[in-house]
Image (spheres, coloured by chain):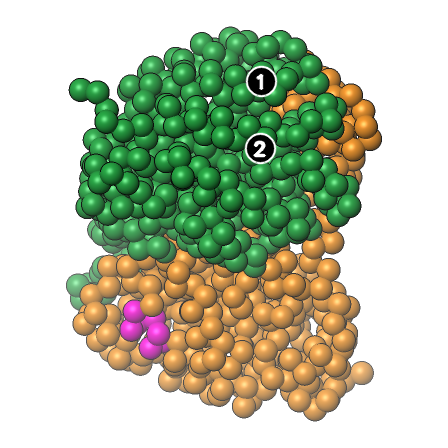
Chain colours: A orange, B green
Amino acid sequence: MERTYKTQMEAAKMGIVTPEMKIVAQKEYRTEEEIREWVAKGQVAICANKNHKCLNPEGVGSMLRTKINVNLGVSRDCKDYNVEMKKVQGDTMPFRRKLTSECPAMIGTVPVYDAVIHYQRDLATLSARDLIDVVRLHAEDGVDFVTLHCGITRHTIDQIKKHKRKMNIVSRGGSLIFAWMCMTGNENPFYEYYDEILDICREYDVTISLGDACRPGCLADAGDVCQIEELVKLGELTKRAWEKDVQVMVEGPGHMPMDQIEANMKIQQSICMGAPFYVLGPLVTDIAPGYDHITSAIGGAIAAASGAAFLCYVTPAEHLALPNVDDVKQGIIASKIAAHAADIAKKIPHAMDRDNAMGDARRTFRWDDQWAVSIDPETAKAIRDSRAPEHDDTCSMCGKFCAVRSMNKALEGEYIDIL
Amino acid sequence: MERTYKTQMEAAKMGIVTPEMKIVAQKEYRTEEEIREWVAKGQVAICANKNHKCLNPEGVGSMLRTKINVNLGVSRDCKDYNVEMKKVQGDTMPFRRKLTSECPAMIGTVPVYDAVIHYQRDLATLSARDLIDVVRLHAEDGVDFVTLHCGITRHTIDQIKKHKRKMNIVSRGGSLIFAWMCMTGNENPFYEYYDEILDICREYDVTISLGDACRPGCLADAGDVCQIEELVKLGELTKRAWEKDVQVMVEGPGHMPMDQIEANMKIQQSICMGAPFYVLGPLVTDIAPGYDHITSAIGGAIAAASGAAFLCYVTPAEHLALPNVDDVKQGIIASKIAAHAADIAKKIPHAMDRDNAMGDARRTFRWDDQWAVSIDPETAKAIRDSRAPEHDDTCSMCGKFCAVRSMNKALEGEYIDIL
């Protein structure tokens, strides 16, 4: 059956509950009507390219479970990296098509990264047309959301020079657009030809993730005029996208002191009219290279609890090297913890079910039931098994001093042996 | 020269600036008079037993740099553990005395843990007198602060039975006192003979860390009547201690949803009249065994930013096994990150200096200067070196796509080669 609508947002505005909305409603313990209404208003994005046939759809919005993003890719310096290389083989197209034909998770790309690789020509030689054509290519390939740094303009060049940030621009895509503008003298094509981009995205139902070129790259740059001016521009671009029924997410934070995070989330919600906020980190200190999955988990949990809908994971290798498989795992788990902690704080329906099951399993020393509800059962079990206790009703941390054991005995009126 | 005062608090009330206050003032970029006034009011504790001669004193208070605590000890199940055993050798006294004669950090103990080991008799056979004598022994040995679970009473037995918490009591010391009360039928000696304990602590200037027996052991138990009723009792006991010039810290949280943390910190500040709050975690989810240093870093950062003064570290082995050396390292670093992030949020003087230096070093690719201000330089350097890049002005994460490199070139008007 041919779809009578172009995008999830258009359907929602027409009063249609799409199959994707039904699935999201079920996953989120919400009514289909709630989901439809939020999609119509742009407060929930269901990133679902019509060409991504195997997609298991998810909704992204502050009232739904917080979602996390994982980055994949290659770097010239790590071309021997088996895992990443197996996936990409030097060209991005086969990898992208394989993902959208086999991977049920929603897929996002940053087309400007790919332009240089796709054309095998250096940045300065690419035309505005070349850059827009890459967006179309990704849309045709079934990508669910594209990060486009539409919010910086030639005016940003003056702003960055004038305000002397400590870290200038640390967004990779943003820096490429900035450099392209500097080298060619032209306006940012993703801003100048935004209407054409909207037409492409409408055609395939690609969600635009409005990139934040000016996200702060250190605590000192957080919340400055460069960041907030771009956010205002992203609010305008959000409105223009919604007028064409194109779904939008807005990208944000980076490095930011804890006390600024909540205010940032609230300002984004008002300026961008509730469009889902997709944040990197935030990293709450600059001095913990090797542990930025932790600095990000702190910031991400606060951000999500204050309204962010989507967390971009950060690995322990951030600022240092291309992450290896273990770094990726550590980054994913830290992000999952942050997202889950925020869901509990936001009182997302059923968010605390597993925590409650864990409490019951701990009180009764049902170790297998503890693993069953753990975020990473293998690691938890391995730690316990590596230093197994004398008695099954304790662990080797406290031995017979175990508080849970003492309390279980005390409440049963039993004698408590400790020596 | 003989001291004319018994405790730091007494001195402060008399208008005396002690040598310890001078050192704390210098470390914290505060005036001596500010420190003296806070100590007089009980809002800063300088835990400094007069017998701990080699102490390098620190102040604990919400307006000072957040401090972190590290736990050491043995467990029967891990008696082969070289590192811990080397320190303790099966008896706690030599370890304790070695620490207070050689270790410049402030030392805290939980005397009730030690009672069973010290007397080599099981819990039910110990008298109230035995338990109080252990406190005196620790005071004589130079311990700077003792955790005493003074806030639970026989009434708590009824409360715990009536309110059917999921995890009952998970405080180890608290559970021992609870079990002792159940087995002997007596009142909690640390409550019943509190005045005698105050006299001991006054004599040596031992700070009492008022233990929170009823801290929640899972999210579901957070903020319940058992926890808050004990907190009210701890407020009363704080007042009684201050009347005898005995310094106090109050212990708190445990497992707690993120959205309850700030309110808990504020309530403690009002009920305990600004006494320094010493919190475990808080752990913001129950389902991440193996990663509870991260769940605690999230909660600890929020707690410290909201007023907690002292964070008890949690290791990845929490709930599973006695931590090994690497677990301890991971726990310390996660706590340091949480404390530092909170100090920045609280605008503690000079808290952001190292972060600012990091930003400058990153922008200019001065890698050695990055390591110099890192929380764990070795780990950061090792990650970079393990996957070294082609060019020194990048890392292997982004290679020539590096945003910092692109921006440096763009702002200098240079051509940016990426291919």
Q: Which residue matches tag 1?
A: B129
Closer to us: A389 or A318: A389
Label 1 to label 2: alpha-carbon separation: 13 Å
Which residues, given as a range, are shown in magenta? A224-230
Examine the rendered structure and indicate whether residue A333 appears above or below residue A221. above
Identify the disc placed on residue A218.
Answer: none
Secondary element at tag 1: helix
Residue A228 in magenta stretch: yes
Q: What is the crowding at mark 1: few (fewer than 14 residues within 10 Å), some, or many (at least 20)?
A: few
On whether residue B179 falls in the magenta region, the answer is no
A400 and B239: which is toward the camera: B239
Q: Residue at x 47, y 11 (%)?
A: B93
Q: Amino acid at mark 2?
A: Tyr
The numbered mark at residue B191 is 2
Q: Horizontally, is B387 left or right of A373 in the view?
A: left
**Dot 2: what SS?**
helix
From the viewer's perspective, is residue A26 above or below residue B124? below
Report the residue at 33% width, 63% height from top.
Answer: A222
Q: Quadrant of residue B334?
A: top left
- Labels 1 and 2: the sequence-earlier one: 1
Q: Is residue B136 visible?
A: yes
